Amino acid sequence: MSRRTNKQNRMMDSPQSTTVNVDLSNASDVTCDNCGNYTFVPVMMMKRLSAILSPTGQEAVIPIQSFACNACGWINKEFLPTGQDEEADTIQSR
């Protein structure tokens, strides 16, 4: 069994900062699938988990962050949690 020194503990516990240079001119823009706008705002979607499925045995409300169009409020499918695509088509077409 090896023992670490205090200096080794500090080095392993502190996050390593790395700088990555990325040329964003080669990246493509994400636009709203509904109106073509380029800006988005963070929104929270809420999921209700029944007491039967909850690990605590109590009903829970779980927040899930997503992004909505700043102009029209549309949420692109790529921003939805997995398995929400068909449900989103129904809700957003109303």
Image (cartoon, rainbow, N blue to C red):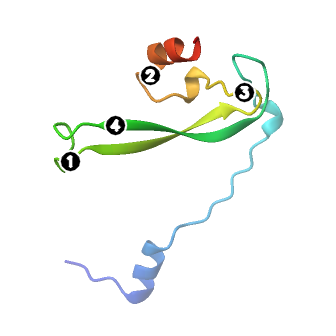
Amino acid identity at mark 3:
Val
Q: Is residue 17 left or right of residue 89?
A: right
Residue 72 picture quarter: top right
Q: Position of residue 80 (x, y in %)?
A: 51, 28
Asked whether disc 3 touches disc 2, contact meaning CB atoms under 8 Å apart, the reply is: no
Residue 10 picture quarter: bottom left
Q: Earlier in the sequence, mark 3 or mark 2?
A: 3
> Which residue is rendered at x = 24% and y = 37% of the image?
50
Q: Which mark is residue 84?
A: 2
Q: Secondary structure at mark 1?
A: loop
Q: Is residue 72 left or right of residue 42?
A: right
Q: Earlier in the sequence, mark 4 or mark 2?
A: 4
Which one is closest to the eye, mark 3 or mark 1? 1
Q: Which mark is residue 30?
A: 3
Separation of residues labelled 3 and 1 (CA atoms): 39 Å
Which one is closest to the eye, mark 1 or mark 2? 1
Which of the two residues, 7 or 81, is positioned nearer the viewer here? 81
Amino acid identity at mark 1:
Gln
Separation of residues labelled 4 and 2 (CA atoms): 14 Å
Asked whether disc 1 touches disc 4, contact meaning CB atoms under 8 Å apart, the reply is: no
Amino acid identity at mark 4:
Arg
Q: Position of residue 51 (x, y in %)?
A: 19, 41
Residue linked to disc 4: 48
Which one is closest to the eye, mark 3 or mark 2? 2
Q: Is residue 62 left or right of residue 74?
A: left
> Which residue is rendered at x = 74% and y = 33% of the image?
70
- Mark 3 crowdedness (10 Å alpha carbons): few <14, some 14-19, many ≥20: few
